[in-house]
Image (tube, rainbow, N blue to C red):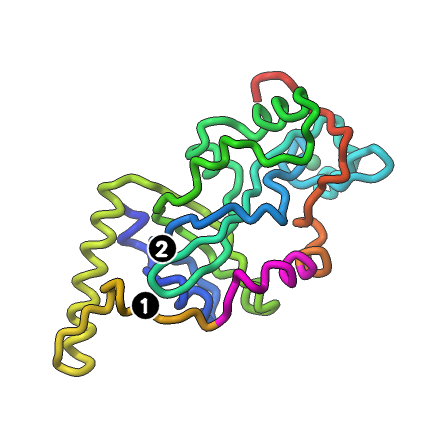
Amino acid sequence: MSLALLTERKTLDEIREARKVCTCVTLATIEKIQTDYNWFYNACKKCQRKVKSEDGKFWCEKCNENARFVIPRYRVQVLVIDHTCTASFVLFDREAKQVIHKSAVELRGRLTKEGDDDSFPRELDVLVKKKFLFKIQVSEFNLNQNWPVFSVSKMTDDENRIAAFKDSLDLNQVSLSVTCDNTEVEICSSDNITPCKRNLFESDVEQSVLVDLISPQMSSNKKEKHIKIEKDNY
Ligand SMILES: [Zn+2]
């Protein structure tokens, strides 16, 4: 409940047009997993931060040492869509694990065992074509770099929460349309779709280049074939 009520609601279009740092809630469907980006990153087991791979070792900036144990953690980038627009969201470990019901350690371990380091595990497909209520952050980085990829801090597919969110949204929109022009406008009806201002589908390639330039720590680590995976119960 708190997720829907205490945080500002925004459509994807409004999120992409945001000019201020904010946290907001949005209802959107995951259209696809953006497989140009890897689905996990290697984290230092001690501090959970991303490690850098250098000469077969993993450097942890936070601990200021080579990490002895490295574990994969989810970082899944998805394309989401609502009635206004599309956007890219990034799901991190806790939220992804909650939906997938398996840890990145388990999935990575299985793929490695099968000798398949490059595939996306099929378990991630449970995310696709599903509607979620997302709590996301529009960060300083999003605004300064005009970076249209937003971090998800919480997500739920709980039907009651989604219904409550929709109900309160309808109320808002009725009063909005009345104040605007005294006629009832069905803002949410499916034949009233506002076109996207920028097309994320087309800019996928451009974005992957940008990821490498702007935030190397987020880029794919497909080249790291020799990853030490801890088999204990993480
Ligand atoms: Zn560390």
**Which quadrant does ligand 1 occupy?**
top right
Residue 2 locus on image (x, y percent): 29, 47
Distance between mark 1 and mark 2 Cα atoms: 20 Å
- Secondary element at image label 2: strand
Tell me where residue 73 sits by quadrant: top right
- Give the residues drawn in magenta, as a range: 198-210
Q: Is residue 64 visible?
A: no
Residue situated furthest right in the rendering: 55
Which mark is on residue 193?
1
Q: Is mark 1 within 8 Å of ligand 1?
A: no
In this orientation, which residue lies closer to the viewer: 60 or 223?
223
Tell me where residue 42 sits by quadrant: top right
Other residues around mark 1 within 10 Å, as few (<14) / some (14–19) / many (≥20): few
- Tell me the quarter of the image containing the N terminus: top left
Residue situated furthest front in the rendering: 191
Which mark is on residue 214?
none
Amino acid of disc 1:
Ile
Tell me where residue 179 sits by quadrant: bottom left
Residue drawn 54% across and 58% down?
149
Residue 134 locus on image (x, y percent): 39, 50
